[in-house]
Image (cartoon, rainbow, N blue to C red):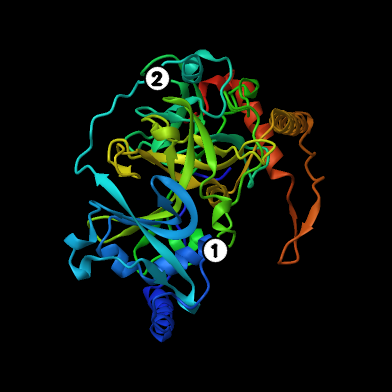
Amino acid sequence: MRPSILFRPPDDTARERASFFTEVQRQLDSEEGGALPAGRQATTILDLMVIRASHSKILRRYSLGTAVGFRMRKGALTDVPAILVFVSRKVNRRWLLDCQVLPTKLVGPGGIWCDVDVVEFSYYTSHASTSREQVYTELVEGLRGSDPQIGPGSQVSSQETYGTLGMIVRSRIDSHQVGFLTNRHVAVDLDHASQKMFHPLPPNLGPGVCLGAVERTTSFVKDKLWYGIFASRSPETFVRADGAFVPFADSFDLSKVTTSVKGVGDMGEVIHVDLQAPIGTIIGKPVVKVGRSSGLTKGMILAYALEYNDDKGICYFTDFLVIGEDGQTFDLEGDSGSLILIVDDGLEKPRPIGIIWGGTENRGRLKLKDGLGLCSWTSAVDLGRLLNLLELDLVTRDEELQACFNNLTTRDAEAMEEKECISNAASVEEAPPKGCTSPITSTTGQSRDIANVEHQLMQDSHAFFEQTNLSRNLFPENISG
């Protein structure tokens, strides 16, 4: 078993990034201007990300952030590929200086172009207070500890924080190792030496059992490692990859675990986002999630690869921007780690695509249509990329989970049997008579009496305990948490 690891991607050089965008700018400068771009219209997520990266300086100067998706009209998505530009206040063009007016279209390398859609984002300068417990339904009460089993959506807690169990996973490093995935900020508390997780509560707060301890985590990843491209001109560009793998403890009974999503049912395989796929393969898709705070909610993927900058000039990305159905909130505090599943009509089963890491209910809201109120939104991590980074596979069926449990039981039994065989062999073996040792030629050419030293020492120690009537219980093992 590997120790806890904070994954750190290899650093790309600032020179490599600068060289890349210098070439991009050279191509842009060679493009002919005109009322309409002469090249082809963007059709893939990668097209939009490359166009945005090419103009990241000017977009960052006049916006709070950007994302890629489809243009919106009167609060509804169209099928027009666009870069979404979030601003603090959207006003008539007459009240803007020429230098403040964003272009209606942007052209990228090779003449590929797309529309620009300006979206108003009302940002709170300080955290607004939110209620921790706002939903009380039979489903939610079950997730918080009333159900006899745990699974996707169930409450998990560290010493000080609670969140949501995302899904059951199996390690690619050790196929016998089964656990669950949640957010790093839910699982890791650096004020405590032991990073253990409990359900429903830790011993210091209420009833609960230990599920296991955190083994592998990740928090931020360089854009080139995550997306395979330079997503921004800034050399300080990171993607929020908030994940933690918690293997189930040996003492935990896996019969108490289910892979089924309560309120949804069985799930299909993970959707791996292909940046070269058409934009409509993910944007606009209906989704659901089940979390310990808000239960079952419905929504839609509004955008991908949301970019924003902090006051120190560091550029951050988050993968999914999700809004709730009919203006409803998609998540509440405590839903961090919840699994997001696409429920498109063409799918036999809902398919997982991401996990929630944060919401903006307490940071800001979107204005998607004039005359309507502000809309809350949710940030989520691309599940396929997170599983690859943490070297995990999703377990989607209870039969698969049972097979993992059987393999684990068999392995433990074999290990115990091997240990007993070694112990028995050591106890029955007698020391060879003097003068009857096996001759082994040393480097000096002389024979030395070299018996099985390990077993000989074990015999001597056993004899010592027998002669002095000492018990091994006087020397307990050093058991660590």
Q: Which image quadrant: the N terminus?
A: top right
* Circles 2 and 1: CB atoms closer than 8 Å: no
Quarter of the rendering containing residue 222: bottom left
**Residue 424 in the figure: left or right of residue 162:** right
Q: What residue type is labelled 1?
A: Thr
Query: Label 2 neighbourhood size at 10 Å, few (<14), some (14-19), many (20+)?
Result: some
**Residue 19: image x %, image y %?**
41, 80
Residue 234 appearing in the image: no
Which residue is outermost to the bottom? 30
Q: Is mark 2 on a helix, strand or loop?
A: loop
Residue that label 2 marks: 135
Q: What residue type is labelled 2?
A: Val
Q: Which residue is drawn at 23% across and 34% down?
A: 128
Vertical placement of residue 103 versus 31, above or below: above
Q: Earlier in the sequence, mark 2 or mark 1?
A: 1
**The label number, if any, that marks residue 43 in the structure image:** 1
Quarter of the rendering containing residue 86: bottom left
Q: CA gap, disc 2 to disc 1?
A: 41 Å
Q: What element carries label 1?
A: loop
**Residue 102: image x %, image y %?**
29, 65
**Residue 301 in the figure: left or right of residue 348:** left
